Amino acid sequence: MKKLVITDSTTIRKKAHAYLREQILSGEIGPQERLIEAKIAKDIGTSRTPVREALHTLEMEGLLESIPRVGYKVNTVSDQEVEEICEIRTVIETLAVRWAMEKAHARLVKELKKNIATAEQRVMQGEVKAYVDLDAQFHEIIAGLSGSRRLLELAQTLRRHMVRYRIQSIYAPDNVIRGINGHKEILAAIVTGDVETAAKAIRNHLEQSKKDILFYAFREHGEEKIKRRQT
């Protein structure tokens, strides 16, 4: 886990919370990884109290699970939560693409084309992991050009939650290619100005992402069961 140094005592709890939350949502702190209050406090150079408060808040948000006499661990994948996030993202992002096409169609097309070209180039160079950020940028271009700051914030939060579950599946080359192709279908519909087709392409793209997440989660859970039988 990356270290953080905080010097402003008045905002230390908020900064510790924001830091740990981003580490979890980005996948830097992985599923089942344990977070020890004393160790985190030492790493970021503060007392244990603000760290304890931050960890408790993250538990209330559903990102962490408290383990008595041990500390906290990052929650594992919940099929139901993945389903919910994908459904909510679909609603928000189809609305975003409608507004973006109405308010900034030319700029939307230009920026999405550039994003896809960069993604293809990086993947061809073997930089598969670069797709994580480029995928985020693709969706945030649409949300950002919707003209709604609140919609952008919601889209970013939901995407981060989804990445927490998707961090393994998103690194698989086949999934990356499917993801880029999904982006191309969205762009093709946007270019023609067909809002309904663009919304459908977004739904299909997020549905595929959901299938990839659940496939990898099932595989990992299956491997864990096999390991337990062997021990």
Image (cartoon, rainbow, N blue to C red):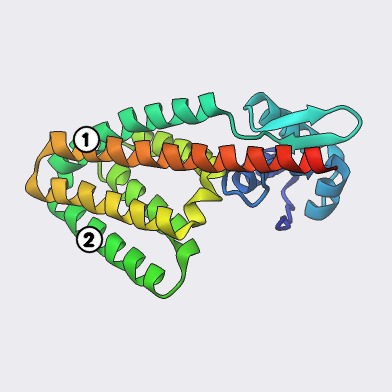
Q: Residues within 10 Å of mark 2 (few under 14, many from 20)?
A: some
Q: Nearer the viewer, residue 148 or 174?
A: 174
Of the two numbered discs 1 and 2 on the same chain, state the one appearing first in sequence: 2
Task: Using the rendered image of the protein, determine whether residue 120 is visible from the camera's viewpoint.
Answer: yes
Amino acid type shown at disc 1: Lys
Total marks in image: 2
Judged from this view, the residue extending furthest toward the right is: 69
Give the quarter of the figure containing the C terminus.
top right
Comparing marks 1 and 2, which lies closer to the viewer?
1
- Please tell me whether mark 2 sits on a helix, a strand or a loop: helix
List x then y, in percent, for residue 173.
44, 60
Asked if residue 32 can be seen in this view, the reply is: no
Q: Residue at x 65, y 38 (%)?
A: 221
- Tell me residue 41's x, y (percent): 83, 47
Give the left or right position of residue 129, taking residue 116 as reference.
Answer: right
Question: Is residue 33 toward the left or the right of residue 174 in the image?
Answer: right
Residue 113's tag is: 2
Residue located at (73% from left, 29% from top): 65
Where is residue 73, by image quadrant?
top right
| On-image quarter of the N terminus | bottom right
Circle 1 SS class: helix
Q: Residue at x 16, y 42 (%)?
A: 101
Disc 1, disc 2: CB below 8 Å? no
For image coordinates 29% across by 35% down, the residue present is: 203
Tell me where residue 96 appears, x and y as whole percent. Answer: 27, 36
Disc assigned to residue 200: 1
